[in-house]
Image (cartoon, rainbow, N blue to C red):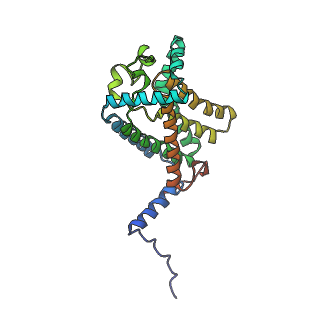
Amino acid sequence: MDEPAQAPAPVAPHTPSDYIRWALRRVRTPRRPVLIVEMVILAAVYGIYSLIRNSVPDDQARAMANSVQVWTAEQSLNIDFELWLNHTVHAVEWLTVTINYFYVFLHFVVTGAVLVWLFLRHPGRYRAARTVLAVTTALALFGYYLFPLAPPRLLPSGLFYDTVALHETVGALTSGDLQNLSNQYAAMPSMHAGWSMWCGIAIVMFARRHWVKVLGVLYPLATVLVITATANHYVLDAVGGWATLAAGFALQRLLHGRSVRAFTQHVAAVP
């Protein structure tokens, strides 16, 4: 009696195109995220980002020239509300202190909270959403290298108040003893604007409660007001951050073959 025929063994990839197709299939196969793996990925991405960002040559003259150029461009477009906002907020001490700590801490707290929420409640969408954030952050490095930019607070004219420094905001990397840990001329694009818009889009797309969706809309708008009121960014820096985020979404869709929204909320574990 003949033995039953066995299914052919899967053919291992042996050409570059085979490896590319195999890698794409693996990347595009939905799977539940693994906590330790995600922690390593996020730590590595941010660590490499910080290392490269802070190693950008300290070209002060070019950064100042670019800053004047951006400020002049905004004036010609009539979107230069930073100076008025900066002086208005500076006149109210409790408001200044509040937005200073918003600027220093919520950038990380809210982004981290949204990542945890996606990981726990939307595991099927988490990896795609995380990819958008990681790619956006990596793309920002090109802006820091190609277009060093001094924030408004560093303009030699002294028009703007450096609110974070004046009020000795604890934990700030833009002034005091910690300022040497961060590149002060890496302002374009603004990752405060890019990350906050990523948070807002994720919340609006996937939150169920309407009031939470409203917070998703308000948070990136509030962030733009905060980064300009503290004189840490121009309006065009925020636009640059949003454009970088758009590129991040586009590259994520190219990599995964579908948009973040097209993924299901839950997915079975895949080895």
Name the quadrant containing residue 149: top left
Dividing the picture into quadrants, the one containing residue 48 is: top left
Is residue 119 depicted above or below 231 in this figure?
below
204 and 157: which one is in front? 157
Looking at the image, the residue that sits furthest to the right is: 210
- Whether residue 184 is visible to the viewer of this picture, yes or no, is no
Q: Quadrant of residue 186?
A: top left
> Looking at the image, which residue is at 53% across and 52% down?
253
- State whether residue 240 is above or below residue 226: below
- Closer to the camera in the image, 180 or 124: 180
Q: Residue at x 51, y 18 (%)?
A: 86
**Most extreme residue toward the front, as rendered?**
76
Which residue is situated farthest in the bottom direction here?
A: 1
Residue 158 visible in this rendered orientation of the protein:
yes
Who's the residue at 31% across and 31% down the image? Answer: 59
Residue 223 placed where, x, y %?
A: 54, 28
Q: Position of residue 156 (x, y in %)?
A: 37, 20
Q: Is residue 62 left or right of residue 188?
A: left
Report x, y in % for residue 102: 51, 23
State the image coordinates of residue 2 (x, y, percent, origin top left): 51, 87
